[in-house]
Image (cartoon, helix red, strand yellow):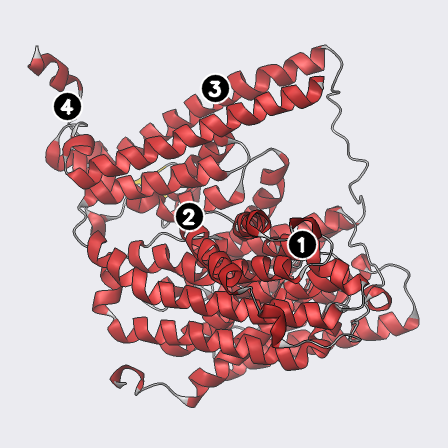
């Protein structure tokens, strides 16, 4: 394996470190995998590319997996994607099968993670090969499609689209970059801000603000309630775990892992969508659907195998198209840029070594997650009880470090962190959705260049429809995704009316 | 006739003005979306207001009036002081270290419920150790720029 020749011992050590920190973040309710990656970013500033990837991917896999611990033991989903784990996991704990449920969840997570890594390894190069032929026009349409898909899957179609377009608008603040054929003029800001905002808002402080600081402000609004979790938590170990639970569940494992992976590929769709979908499917196909929700192992299997399937899935559009599949990969895109990686259709072909290292890191991270959780689950479960008045101040401190150091000491980046922390906190109150916003923000500048350059060279708007069969096909997808969401909105509204009268 | 329609879609972009071309479009799209949101979501909302089904009063009852504003004030003070103190010790990251210690302690104090001696001890230790470790690892070992 010539690609792995230059991997150091540090590389293999950083993966479990990342996994453990990730699991801790995932396990503490209110803290997510996205936050884990955002807060730990400064640690990667001084690492080289491979080591940085090791830590980041470890954090990602660990963060997604950790959510099952409080979901099963306390009926609180540690991350949004473990909501469905509570349905059957917690009833199992109540029956004294807590440890068994945890181990079922961990094994399913491992399976989902590995399956999705395999799909990633197979699918991302294919998609990238296909996307290499894209001209600016198809690239613009891909971004347009990504934004419509996110919007159509958000709670409110119009609010979702608005959030995405707002993200695009905010990203345009600053200079119209000469290096991409712009004219170098500054736009969208009053003159006195030009000194600070000539390059626009930096991506990472924006992300850290939205996912780190905003979360803490939400918790502060609720008063940082403290519950005595340690006394509530009973790790029932009366019934021992054995692999025989998985007998007859192989199809469930595969189905859920695949659902997770493919939902993960859709940009901006959170993990909860994947696990809810696979849980419903497991219920539909179950021989004893009446037991689901009352402590059936297959519910835990479906949920956990799906939410770990997300990890590989979300990396597919990120690595092959440069479009993040969820908010965590949105932070990863920032971290990659920092390491000098430009993700997009050319990435895999031009960086074979890095690409193989990434797949390897995802696989190792999944095994590390399994080993850590399977054998140290009792100690990890204790972490949930670390009080928030100790944790949150540290998180704010790490947010500051991450924002300040990103451009080698720019205080304005720290203020950006605060601005977007407050924005993220207020946005949810008025119905702006953060996931479409952030994807719009990340893709906005490229969208502008693709759009304007296409028009400059072809001189007509019709080219977006007639350039190639791929362009037409993308339009079909765009129309389908908008149409589907309008259809489901109308259906829901009817349902509401029906329920209201009935 | 054919020419007439296709000329409708003709676009010519003046390079000197090209930096405002796309932002202007996005701006108008935002406005149209706002209008649509008002038509589809705002009108039913206003109607329910008029019928008295919903009240306009923004309820602040569930907001923690101490911890939320406290977080904001402390964070702003933290950022300002860190920068200010840092100017006395250029390039050593000591502004960060010296200001983080009281910040972490005060924020813990703000967040904690039912305070007792054991908690104060834990908070003080945390406030001393966490920034010191962060400062040592990042600024000293990894040479990362801190205020």
Q: Distance between the residues labelled 1 and 3?
A: 33 Å
Determine the chain carrying the residue at label 4. Answer: B
Determine the chain carrying the residue at label 2. Answer: A
Q: Which mark is residue B35?
A: 3
Is residue A100 positioned above or below A207 on the image?
below
Q: Do the residues labelled 2 and 4 touch (CB within 8 Å)?
A: no
Nearer the observer: mark 1 or 2; the answer is: 2
Asked where in the image residue A65 lies, by quadrant, the reply is bottom right
Crowd around label 4: few <14 · some 14–19 · many ≥20 (10 Å): some
Residue A85 seen anywhere in this rendered image of the structure:
yes
Query: Which comes before the other along the chain, label 1 or label 2?
Result: 1
Q: Residue A267 carries which label?
A: 2
Residue A449 seen anywhere in this rendered image of the structure:
no
Crowd around label 3: few <14 · some 14–19 · many ≥20 (10 Å): few
Q: Locate residue A38 relative to residue A188 in the image: left or right.
A: right
Disc 1 designates what residue? A216
Asked where in the image residue A151 lies, by quadrant, the reply is top left
Determine the chain carrying the residue at label 3. Answer: B
Q: What residue sits 39% from the left and 35% below the top?
A: A481
Nearer the observer: mark 2 or 4; the answer is: 2
Q: Where is residue A441 in the image (x, y as percent from the top left)?
A: 41, 45
Disc 4 designates what residue? B10
Q: What element carries label 1?
A: helix
Same chain assignment for discs 1 and 4: no
Q: Are marks 2 and 3 in contact (CB under 8 Å)?
A: no
Q: Do the residues labelled 1 and 2 touch (CB within 8 Å)?
A: no
Q: Distance between the residues labelled 1 and 2?
A: 25 Å
Crowd around label 1: few <14 · some 14–19 · many ≥20 (10 Å): many
Determine the chain carrying the residue at label 1. Answer: A
């Amino acid at each position: 394996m010539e690609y792995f020749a230059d991997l150091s011992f540090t590389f293999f050590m950083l993966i479990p470190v990342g996994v453990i920190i990730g699991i801790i973040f995932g396990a503490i309710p209110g803290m997510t995998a996205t936050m884990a990656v955002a807060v730990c970013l400064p640690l990667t500033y001084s690492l080289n590319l491979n080591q940085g990837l090791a830590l980041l991917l470890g954090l990602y896999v660990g963060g997604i997996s950790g959510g099952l611990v409080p979901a099963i033991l306390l009926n609180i989903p540690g991350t949004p994607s473990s909501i469905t784990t509570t349905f059957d996991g917690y009833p199992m704990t109540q029956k004294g099968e807590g440890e068994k449920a945890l181990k079922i969840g961990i094994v399913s997570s491992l399976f989902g993670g590995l399956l999705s890594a395999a799909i990633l390894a197979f699918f991302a190069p294919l998609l990238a090969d296909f996307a290499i032929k894209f001209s600016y026009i198809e690239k613009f349409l891909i971004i347009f499609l990504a934004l419509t898909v996110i919007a159509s899957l958000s709670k409110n179609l119009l609010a979702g689209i608005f959030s995405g377009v707002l993200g695009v608008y905010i990203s345009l603040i600053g200079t119209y970059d000469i290096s991409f054929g712009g004219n170098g003029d500054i736009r969208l800001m009053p003159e006195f801000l030009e000194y600070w905002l000539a390059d626009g808002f930096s991506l990472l402080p924006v992300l850290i603000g939205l996912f780190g600081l905003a979360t803490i402000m939400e918790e502060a609004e609720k008063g940082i309630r403290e519950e005595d979790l340690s006394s509530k938590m009973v790790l029932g170990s009366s019934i021992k775990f054995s692999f025989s639970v998985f007998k007859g569940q192989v199809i469930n494992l595969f189905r859920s892992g695949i659902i997770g992976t493919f939902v993960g590929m859709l940009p901006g769709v959170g993990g909860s969508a994947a696990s809810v979908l696979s849980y419903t499917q497991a219920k539909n196909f179950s021989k004893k659907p009446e037991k689901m929700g009352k402590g059936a192992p297959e519910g835990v299997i479906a949920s956990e195998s799906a939410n770990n399937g997300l990890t590989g899935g979300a990396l597919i559009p990120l690595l092959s198209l440069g479009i993040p599949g969820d908010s965590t990969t949105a932070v990863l895109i920032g971290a990659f840029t920092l390491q000098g990686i430009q993700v997009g259709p050319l990435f895999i072909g031009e960086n074979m070594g890095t690409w193989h290292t990434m797949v390897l890191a995802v696989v190792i991270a999944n095994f590390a997650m399994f080993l850590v959780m399977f054998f140290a689950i009792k100690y990890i479960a204790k972490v949930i009880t670390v009080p928030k008045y100790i944790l949150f101040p540290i998180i704010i401190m790490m947010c500051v470090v991450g924002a300040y150091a990103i451009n080698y000491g720019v205080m304005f980046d720290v203020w950006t962190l605060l601005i977007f922390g407050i924005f993220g906190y207020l946005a949810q109150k008025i119905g702006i959705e953060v996931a479409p916003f952030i994807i719009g923000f990340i893709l906005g500048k490229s969208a502008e260049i693709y759009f304007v350059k296409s028009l400059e060279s072809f001189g007509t708007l019709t080219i977006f429809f007639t350039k190639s069969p791929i362009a037409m096909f993308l339009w079909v997808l765009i129309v389908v995704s908008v149409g589907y969401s309008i259809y489901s909105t109308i259906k829901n509204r009817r349902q509401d009316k029906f329920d209201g009268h009935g | 006739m054919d020419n007439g329609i296709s000329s409708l879609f003709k676009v010519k972009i003046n390079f000197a003005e090209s930096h405002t071309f796309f932002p202007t479009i996005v701006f108008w799209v935002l406005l149209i979306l706002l209008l649509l949101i008002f038509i589809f979501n705002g009108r039913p909302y206003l109607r329910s207001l008029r019928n008295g089904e919903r009240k306009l009063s923004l309820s602040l009852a569930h907001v923690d009036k101490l911890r939320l504003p406290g977080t904001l004030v402390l964070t702003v003070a933290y950022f300002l002081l860190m920068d200010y103190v840092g100017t006395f010790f250029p390039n050593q990251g000591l502004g960060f270290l010296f200001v983080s210690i009281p910040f972490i302690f005060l924020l813990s104090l703000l967040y904690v419920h039912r305070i007792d001696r054991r908690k104060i001890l834990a908070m003080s230790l945390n406030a001393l150790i966490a920034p010191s470790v962060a400062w040592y690892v990042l600024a000293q070992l990894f040479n990362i720029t801190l205020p």
